[in-house]
Amino acid sequence: MGKVEPDSSEEMFVQLFAANERHLRAFVRSMGLGWEEVDDVIQTTSLVMWRKWDQFDPETSFLAWGRVIARFEVLKARRTLARDRHVFRRDLMDLL
């Protein structure tokens, strides 16, 4: 069975995102966030990617484009977490 071509730009986005979500999630996790933060960052990343979908060049890598956006979202999440007074270092949480 051959690859099904998407009927619309929206379908193309959904297909590419679904095919690459696992890789994006692993990339975000590799940047030191916990699983809950990874879920939040992936959700935000998907929204940013959707809003910027018209800027994506189909001749380039969807995954590379998504990683750039995810990286910025991770940096935002880290700034937010750093402002939270109730965040403990991961090694302390593991000890507790």
Image (cartoon, helix red, strand yellow):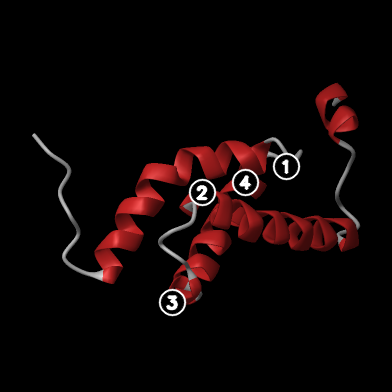
**Residues under labels 1 and 3: Cα distance?**
29 Å
* The N terminus sits in image quarter: top left
Image location of residue 62, percent across then percent down: 47, 54
Asked whether 10 or 39 is in front, the reply is 10
Residue at mark 2: 63
Q: Is residue 43 left or right of residue 69?
A: left
CB atoms at circles 3 and 4 under 8 Å apart? no
Give the mark nearer the N terminus: 4 vs 2.
4
Residue at mark 4: 38
The amino acid pointed to by label 3 is Asp
The amino acid pointed to by label 1 is Leu
Residue at mark 3: 54
**Residues under labels 2 and 1: Cα distance?**
19 Å
Asked whether 85 or 46 is in front, the reply is 46
| Residue depth check, mark 2 versus mark 1: number of the one nearer the observer | 2
Binning the other alpha carbons within 10 Å of mark 4 as few (below 14), some (14 to 19) or many (20 upward) gives many
Which residue is painted at 61% across and 51% down in the image? Answer: 67
The amino acid pointed to by label 4 is Val
**Residues under labels 3 and 4: Cα distance?**
25 Å
Asked whether 81 or 41 is in front, the reply is 41
The amino acid pointed to by label 2 is Leu
Give the mark nearer the N terminus: 2 vs 1.
1
Which residue is painted at 58% across and 36% down in the image? Answer: 26
Marker count (numbered): 4
CB atoms at circles 1 and 3 under 8 Å apart? no
| Local SS, label 2 | helix
| Residue depth check, mark 4 versus mark 2: number of the one nearer the observer | 2
**Residues under labels 1 and 4: Cα distance?**
6 Å
